[in-house]
Image (spheres, rainbow, N blue to C red):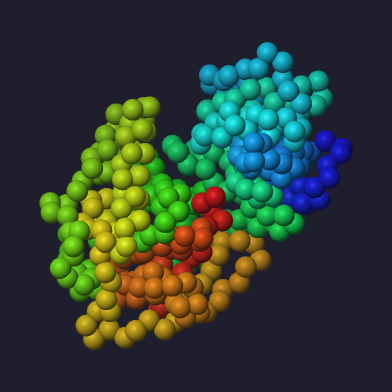
Amino acid sequence: MSTTTYPTARAVAARAQSHFTRHIELARSRGRKHLATVPDAASLEAMVDAAFWASLRREEGLTPKISLALLSSEQAGVPLLFEHPLPLTPAGLAKLAPAVERPGIHLGVWPVDGNLRVWGTTRELPAYCPVIEVVGSGWLVIKHRAETFGKFVNVAVLEGDEIKVVDENNARVPDCPGLLKSMLGFENLQRADERVNVLVLIAASMRAHGRGGMLLVVPSGTDGWRSSIVGPVLYAVDPHFAGLAEVLGRQDAGPSPDWEEDLRRAVDTIAGLTAVDGATLLDDRYELLAFGAKISRGRNQPPVERVLVTEPIEGSVVTEATPVQLGGTRHLSAAQFVQDQHDSSALVASQDGRFTIFTWSTREACVHAHRVEALLL
């Protein structure tokens, strides 16, 4: 731990350690069980350092994609254990990468005789377990598992010498949408019977398919949104497709491997439709209304000219922009739709990895664009 050669690791470790300490202690005060051990800054620093240098190596010409989790094997449910724990070195991590690059597999790291060692792999993590994930060359994310199924919360994004620390206080600003609150770790479920925020899962899946796309979320039981859609819609769905809603309706039986897999499939089905040119429409009961829809300015509605832009990163400031400055026609169309339909929201994924949530700000009387790609890595 004393040979850290990636300066950013040292710069971020104490801030990350403070985050984990605060959340774990708060969860304990609420009586939560099965929580991670509070990490020390030195361990976080060593893990970030090793992961960074491993990300710059090549294994058979490919960038290693690994996820390091700081926990003991006893906290890992049913782990795969190495007979002899391995040293935490960039070369060793790069060699292991092909075996653990699939999503959901983490290399377990824990002190052994005073030194951090890789003891094996696990798919199960306690809540608030620190995770260091390599997403590209010199590109890391520090995150933790949340208390709800299938969800991780990003703490910081490191890209070379740049540090983006997530600002949790963004969840407390007026007009902050529930989806963003959930991404920041503050549960804001749309329905009382939900155990997961489905829109977070859809957003992550939209970003993962890499083709760009738009999802419009509209109120159920009303057709007001049709005034902002060019008709007829080529891929209108009748009756409304309730596959995702049906899976969610089975939550009362409690989470299970089968239910979780069904939910992932249903989420990927909706997210996959957003890759088709045009917008996918989903109501707030998670019923699919249409996809490939074209947005038009509502009758007698003014063109959108002003958009507030924020990013939930420490040190970022509120800016004002035109929709064209945010991106291409997708962003312009999404902003126009939300300006015309105040009770709706739009999720826009760009091919370059950017992700924006458009909502109507009652306080500012304009469209608010929330840049959230740092929360979806």
Q: Can residue 97 be seen in this view?
A: yes
Q: Residue extending furthest right?
A: 2
**Percent x, y for residue 94?**
68, 34
Residue 63 as seen in the image, left or right of residue 288? right
Residue 340 as seen in the image, left or right of residue 159? left
Count of numbered tags = 0
In the image, residue 133 sits, relative to residue 213, either above or below, namely: above
Q: Residue extending furthest front?
A: 60
In front: 332, or 201?
332
Quarter of the image containing the N terminus? Answer: top right
**Percent x, y for residue 186?**
49, 50
Q: Residue at x 51, y 58 (%)?
A: 353
**Percent x, y for residue 318?**
56, 73
Q: Residue at x 54, y 50 (%)?
A: 377
Q: Quadrant of residue 283?
A: bottom left
**Percent x, y for residue 95?**
68, 30
Q: Is residue 132 visible?
A: no
Q: Which residue is drawn at 65% across and 57% down?
A: 164
Q: Residue extending furthest top?
A: 83
In front: 115, or 86?
86
